[in-house]
Amino acid sequence: MTDAGQPADDERPDPRRLTSVEQRIDAAAHRLLAGAPEHGARAKLLEFLVFGAKQAWACVFGAALLAVIVAARLWYPDDAWLARNDALTLAAVAIQIVMLATRLETGRELWVIVLFHLTGTAMELFKTDVGSWSYDGDGVLRIGAVPLFSGFMYAAVGSYMVRVYRLFDLRFTRYPRRWLTAIVAAAIYANFFGHHFIVDFRWVLLAAVVVLWWPAMMHFRVWRRVHRMPLLVAFGLVALFIWFAENIATWGGAWLYPDQLDGWHPVSASKLVSWFLLMIISVVLVTFVYRPREPDAPAGR
């Protein structure tokens, strides 16, 4: 890897980090783009298009699940013998099986996705009990008031995180010590429960995140070039993207907040802070699968 904005010596992500299917797609893409210009406006446009394609590929689990939620809202019959929530759960299971069977996810990554699923379901059980949001009451594939497909929405975030790490060959400079990040992530998770009983520490935790990750820079390979951005900016952009997806999911009736029960309207922008903090938990979990790596030293250094 070279300095940000400079062509990379090896234009491909580390093949050890790609699944077998992704390696074939990567090879086909490089054959297709072999004659593309390396400089000028067309090169920049191509780099942008490849960036978008990789992001879309990283989101394939979440996009498929969101498409199923929207399709169920538009076309699932109210009098179907299978409850809508149960159909969503079975569809989510099928998506996960396909991801594994087609080698789009590795067994190693599945463990962190399962962990996302479990931690998310635990939060769902508590949050629905205290009335933070609610689901329709139909279906038998549920734990209490929580349909089982809800855990897959957290798993979709985990899937994106581990896939984007591989596809963009992420490297980091000045990344904080992992034990410190684990403490902050644990405090954030505890605050999602504890703020209902004691003081809400989200702003203190947000300040801790800013202090801890402020110096960190993310280096990511798109195609020919390696770019960089402050890691906090990357966190914010992903949180914004999840907030957009949340608006689609609540419009699709996957769940509703109390102020949406009398009629859907966009989710409050204040939820961006919650998603930003949830992002920190996601990032910390992924770093225990893929240890943060420094960029390779430029040639001759």
Image (cartoon, rainbow, N blue to C red):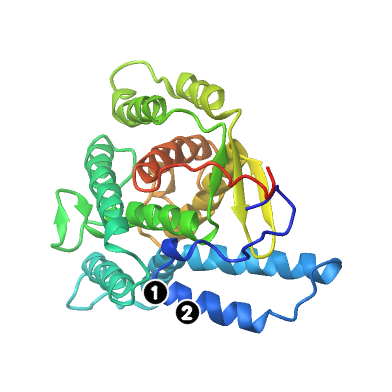
Mark 2: give few (<14), some (14-19) or many (20+) Cα within 10 Å. few
Local secondary structure at mark 2: helix
Figure quadrant of the C terminus: top right
Judge by depth and name the residue closer to the eye, 153 or 270: 153
> As drawn, is 292 to the left or to the right of 7?
left
Mark 1: give few (<14), some (14-19) or many (20+) Cα within 10 Å. some
Residue 137, quarter of picture: bottom left
Q: Are marks 2 and 1 in contact (CB under 8 Å)?
A: yes
Residue type beneath disc 2:
Arg
Q: CA distance from mark 2 to mark 1?
A: 7 Å
Label at residue 24: 2
Local secondary structure at mark 1: helix
Residue placed at 79% from the left, 69% from the top?
38
Image position, residue 115 (x, y; %)? 26, 48
Residue 295, quarter of picture: top right
Residue placed at 62% from the left, 83% from the top?
31
> As drawn, is 30 to the left or to the right of 85?
right
